[in-house]
Image (tube, rainbow, N blue to C red):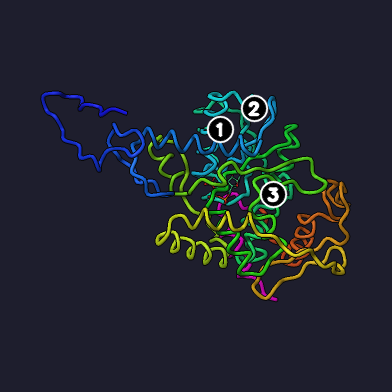
Amino acid sequence: MSFTPPSDPKKPKSIKVSQLCELCHSRKALIKRPKNLQKICKLCFFHVFETEIHNTIISNNLFEYGEKVAVGASGGKDSTVLAYVLKLLNERYNYGIQIVLLSIDEGIVGYRDDSLATVKRNKEQYGLPLEIVSYRELYDWTMDEIVACAGVRNSCTYCGVFRRQALDRGAAKLGIRHVVTGHNADDMAETVLMNILRGDVARLEKSTAIMTQSSGSPIKRSKPFKYSYQKEIVLYAHYKKLDYFSTECTYAPEAFRGTARELMKNLEAVRPSCIIDIIYSGESLRLKPKRTKRAPPAGHVEVCSDGSVSLNGGDFVDGNRCERCGYLSSNRICKACMLLEGLQQNRAKLSIDRDVSTHGAARLTRTLEQLTF
Ligand SMILES: Nc1ncnc2c1ncn2[C@@H]1O[C@H](COP(=O)(O)OP(=O)(O)OP(=O)(O)O)[C@@H](O)[C@H]1O
């Protein structure tokens, strides 16, 4: 491509060749791509970023024409960029999908309420319908209450199980069978690393799948940002001036995930391609066939030495429904109901004041501190 002359011919700016975009060779390079350190201009960055996501969508046949798709919208950078880019690509390439924003309100005062305000603005900005489903309406618990009852240590376990099911139930309510989330390449690599370090072979096998579907559930999940670097998502949101919420969750990430994240960041600083390389390694692993092991009894909840909760719902039955809540579950009792049972036993013991409308977790924590056992 030819060199673009400066806009004011009287004041010619000498652009060093090294400062020109390495892709169009005409505009000034403004961004060093975190993925491959290429120096490129803003327009080429938008183009490559969007095109790589389009290629991921097409090469993995993520969407069917006419399909209704729910974007798991948390108001954070990843899902905000996902909603924006999906709408743009859907119009540009005519995927023929109908996009809906689906948000889960976990009930974390001072965090999720603020991020949901962002999603409500995104709804207007992008002209997309929004559905909000809350833990309170589904489980009669908020995350603030759960943390006050079960402690902050296991909060990610509870939140993860409930959010997963809540997204499914929210989608089912809307008659949607496909949920897309903003999980990015960094999240993927981090998960592969964590599973390797834990020796969790069963999870390792599934951790790089772009599309997943639980047995017994009609709802599939996909991750169009599987190969998109977090730093590039942030850059895109910044240069596109997207409206997103950037505060970390009140409850710190699971300690081990935090350590794996730190390790990934250090590795990326030395060798940026290691994020993609870890994903490729995960995809290429061939695991030994599994040995069958006798399952613990149904409803068994085991707290491991690292504080994590291991769940077992007994015999695996495809297409089953949970005996308690009636929602689709591959186990006799779904994971959410197993966790709820433990929480309810604690609630009965502690008789926690449920009115958290004013002070959230702080109020409940104080209530707990006043109790004697
Ligand atoms: N409360 C929620 N409601 C709907 N979807 C959610 C919610 N929380 C998370 N998700 C979905 O799961 C993805 C990964 O969530 P995670 O908690 O890891 O947040 P994240 O990496 O900070 O992403 P984001 O920047 O979108 O918040 C999000 O991108 C989003 O698609």
Q: Element type at marker 1?
A: helix
Numbered badge on residue 97: 2
Label 1 crowd (10 A; few <14 / some 14-19 / many >=20)? many
Residue 348 spot, x, y in % from top left: 77, 63
**Outermost residue, left direction?**
10
What residue does disc 1 label? Answer: 86
Which marked residue is nearer to the observer: mark 3 or mark 2? 2
Q: Which residues are magenta?
A: 355-373
Which marked residue is nearer to the observer: mark 1 or mark 3? 1
Tell me the distance, in whole angstroms, between the alpha carbons under discs 1 and 3. Answer: 21 Å
What residue does disc 3 label? Answer: 164
- Front residue of this view, candidates 371 and 98: 98
Residue 47 found in image quarter: top left
Label 2–label 1 contact, CB within 8 A: yes
Q: Tag 1: residue type?
A: Leu
Earlier in the chain: of badge 1 and badge 3, it is 1
Q: Is residue 372 magenta?
A: yes
